[in-house]
Image (cartoon, coloured by chain):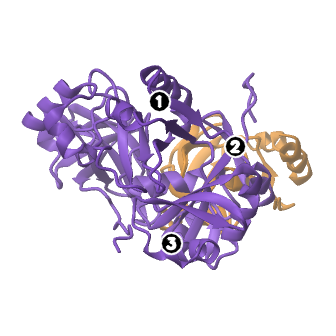
Chain colours: A orange, B purple
Amino acid sequence: MSIPANLKYAEDHEWVRVEGDNAVIGITDFAQNQLGDIVFVELPEPGTEVAPGKAVGSIESVKAVNELFCPLSGTVTEVNTELENSPQSLNSDPYEAGWIFKIRLGKPAELDGLMDADAYGDFTANG
Amino acid sequence: MTDSPIPLKRTPLYDLHVELGGRMVPYAGYEMPVQYPAGILKEHLQTRAAASLFDVSHMGQTWLDGADAIAVMEELTAADLKALAPGEQRYTQLLNAQGGIFDDLIITRPADGGDRLYMVVNAARKAEDYALIREHAAGRAELRPLEDHALLAIQGPQAVAAVAALFGDAVRTQSFMTQHGGVWNGVACLVSRSGYTGEDGFEISVPAAAAADLARALLAAPGCGPAGLGARDSLRLEAGLCLYGQDIDAGTTPVEAGLVWSIGKRRRQEGGFPGADVIMAQLRDGPARRRVGLLPEGRVPARSGAAILDSDGTEIGMVTSGGFGPSLEAPVAMGYVPAALAAPGSAVQLAVRDKRIPAKVVKMPLVPQNYYRG
C-alpha cells in the first residue's frame, strides 16, 4: 500500500498536499483498493465552502456509491475535470493524476490534526 | 468481517479463493469472493472476451427422487416438465397462490432417464424452497439435497475449450440447456451447458473433495481467470437476467417479469399451477406493469430502489437492479414501469440522490446473447 511521505492523511482516507495557502486533496491507495473499480466521480463546484464532516461529492464504484468528504475548512478553487472521462485514474494513480479538488485553506491550524505518513500507515494496518 | 452470531458457511473452494487473493464477503450465509485482485471490471470483461470461473457452490443443488417428481414440480411451477427429454433443463419459477414468484430455479431431467429430477435453487432461498417442495412432495417424491458437491460455472467464448480439454470433445456439440454426466480424472460430474452471464458456458457439479483440483484445472486453460460475485452481478445485469429478491419476488408474476417464455404452452392452456387464475388473466389482458431495461443518460448509475418517474416527475415505478455495465461502458438498470411506458424508447427519469436523470426504456438483453445454438 503506497503512502507518500510528503503528504498528510485523514481518517476518512483522504490525502492532503499542502501548497502554501492551498491544499490539494484526493483519496489514498488504501481507499481506492477498498472501493474497487471507480466508475464515476461527482466533483464539488468551485467556490463551494467546505468543512470537516461535510460531504463535498461522491465516488461511485461498480458496487456502491460513497460520499467524498473534505477533512479541512476552506473554499474549493479547482477540481480535476479529467476525472469526468477517466474516473479510473483514482484507482491507477491516486496521488497524481487522480487528484480530486483543491481548496484555499480556511483554518490552516486544522492541518495539525491530520496524520503523517507513518501514523496513517499504523492507522490502516490496524483499522 | 461480520458480527453475525451464526458463523458464515464456506464452500469447498474457500481456501482456493483466499489463495487467489479473493476479497471474501458475506453472501446468503456464505463467505464468498466478491472479486479477486484483477477487480470487477476486468473480471467482467474477461468473461465476455475469454473465460471466467465462478464458484456457485453456495446455491442449492438437490435431487427429487421418484416417478412422481415431474408431477410434483408441475404442481409448483408453470413449466412443461413432462416434455423434458433426458438431459434437458428448463428455467422456471416456484409460484405462490397470487401468481407471484417464490424462487426461480433450473430443473433438469437426468441424461440417464432415471426417475428423478436435478434442481438448482438460489442460495438465499434454499431452506424455504426445500421446505416447500418437501411438504408438497410428501409421500410421493423425496427431496435429497446434494450436501457434498461443489458447483462451478465457467463462462465465456473460451469456456468450451477449457471444458473439452478435461471432459472430452463431446461437450463442444452439447446443446444449450442440457446436462450430461462427465468424468474427469476418474471423478463423476454433472456437466450442463448453462449459465447466468449471457455467454456460452458450462456449470459443473463436482464432489467436494475434487472441487479445488477441478477448479485449478479449469483455471489453467488459456484465457481463463477467476471471477467473483461482483462480476457475476454486472454480467447478468447486462444480460437482462433476473436476481431473485431484487427483480422478482413474491409480489411479481412471471408475466410482469417478462418470463412468459418459461411458461409451457400446454401449461398456459391447462393451468394447474399456483396463481394460474392471475397469470392466465395477465396473459389474456396483459399485465399492468412490466420489467424493462433502462439506460440512464450520462455516467451516474441508478441502483436498486431508485424511483422511476415519468416526464412530469410523477413516480411510476422502481429500479430493481442497476449499476455500471462494463461491456457497455455505461450505467444500466432494470425495473418495473406501467405497461403503457414499457415500449423500448419510452422516456423516463430516474431519481438518484437529489437528481433526476433522463433514461430510456430498452429491450433486454442489453448485450448480445452468445448461447450455443449448434
Q: Quadrant of the C terminus of chain B?
A: bottom left
The reply to the same-chain question for discs 2 and 3 is yes
The reply to the same-chain question for discs 1 and 2 is yes
A18 left or right, relative to B347: right
> Residue at point 62% right, 77% down?
B165
Q: Earlier in the sequence, mark 2 or mark 3?
A: 2
> Above or below — where is B42 with respect to B267?
below
Q: Which mark is residue B141?
A: 1
| Towards the viewer: A49 or B264 | B264
Q: Earlier in the sequence, mark 1 or mark 3?
A: 1
> Above or below — where is A68 with respect to B140?
below
Position of residue B200 measured from the top left corner of the image (x, y, whole percent): 44, 68
Q: Label 1 amino acid?
A: Ala
Comparing labels 1 and 3, the label whose residue is closer to the camera:
1
Q: For mark 2, what is the residue?
A: B148
Q: Are marks 1 and 2 in contact (CB under 8 Å)?
A: no
Local packing at callout 2 (Cα closer than 10 Å; few below 14, some 14-19, many 20+) is few
* Helix, strand or loop under label 3: helix
Q: For mark 3, what is the residue?
A: B171
